[in-house]
Image (tube, helix red, strand yellow):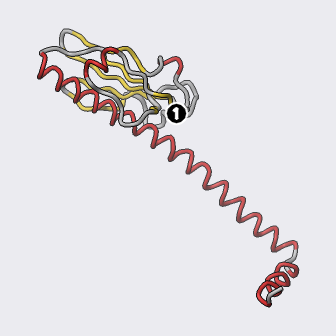
C-alpha cells in the first residue's frame, strides 16, 4: 500500500467507539433535517405548477374570446379530481383545450385543470393533491382576475 493509504488505515483503526457514535449521530441528524426539507420543497415546486398553468389557460381563453367572440369550457383533465395523487400524470387534452390550442409545456402534470364557462365569463380551476392526503390544493382564475389560491398555504 502507498504511504497515504497506510496512514488513513491507521487513522481509521485508531478511531474509538465514541468517535464512530458521534460521526453516526451527525450523519443521522443531517438526514433527519434534510429529508423533510426536500419533501417540502418538492411539494412547493409541484404546487407552483398550479398558478402557472391556470394563468396560461386564462390567457388562452382571453385570446380565444378576442379572436372568436366566446369562451371554451373543458372538463377536468388529465384526470378527475377524485383520482388526484402525489404522482404526475400524462397530459390528456380535451376537445375544449384542443379548441383553445392549449397544452402544458411538459408531458406530465401534477394538477387537474378545468374551465367552467358561464354567461358572465369563465373560471379556470387547477387542483392538485401533492402529498396524497386527500385534501386538494385549489387555484382559480377568471376573465378579470389572475390565478389566486383558494385553499390554505399548508395545503399541498
Rendered residue at 42%/22% (across/down)? 92
Q: Is residue 134 above or below residue 14?
A: above
What is the secondary structure assignment of the residue under circle 1?
Answer: loop
- Name the residue located 30 percent from the left edge and 20 percent from the top edge: 98
Q: In the figure, is residue 45 to the left or right of 123? A: right
Q: Quadrant of residue 102?
A: top left
Q: Position of residue 65 (x, y in %)?
A: 15, 20
Could you tell me residue 111's position as x and y percent? 44, 29
Q: Residue 64, relative to residue 7: is it above or below?
A: above
Measuring from the top left, give residue 40's x and y in whole percent. Answer: 53, 45
The quadrant holding residue 103 is: top left
Seen at 52% across and 33% down, the residue is: 130
The residue beneath circle 1 is 130
Residue 72 locus on image (x, y percent): 25, 15
Give the side of residue 74 with respect to residue 21, left or right.
left
Residue at 24% of width from left, 32% of height from top? 146
Q: Quadrant of residue 138?
A: top left
Identify the image quadrant of the N terminus. Answer: bottom right
Q: Is residue 115 above or below residue 50?
A: above
Amino acid at each position: 500500500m502507498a504511504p497515504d493509504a497506510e496512514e488513513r488505515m491507521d487513522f481509521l483503526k485508531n478511531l474509538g467507539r465514541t468517535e464512530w457514535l458521534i460521526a453516526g449521530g451527525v450523519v443521522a441528524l443531517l438526514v433527519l433535517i434534510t429529508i423533510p426539507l426536500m419533501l417540502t420543497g418538492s411539494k412547493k415546486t409541484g404546487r407552483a405548477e398550479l398558478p402557472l398553468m391556470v394563468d396560461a389557460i386564462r390567457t388562452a381563453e382571453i385570446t380565444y374570446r378576442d379572436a372568436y367572440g366566446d369562451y371554451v369550457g373543458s372538463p377536468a383533465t388529465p384526470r378527475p379530481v377524485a383520482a388526484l395523487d402525489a404522482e404526475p400524470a400524462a397530459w390528456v387534452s380535451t376537445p375544449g383545450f384542443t379548441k383553445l390550442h392549449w397544452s402544458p409545456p411538459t408531458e406530465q402534470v401534477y394538477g387537474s385543470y378545468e374551465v367552467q364557462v358561464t354567461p358572465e365569463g369563465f373560471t379556470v380551476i387547477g387542483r392538485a393533491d401533492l402529498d396524497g392526503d386527500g385534501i386538494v390544493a385549489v387555484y382559480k382564475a377568471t376573465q378579470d382576475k389572475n390565478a389566486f389560491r383558494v385553499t390554505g398555504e399548508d395545503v399541498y
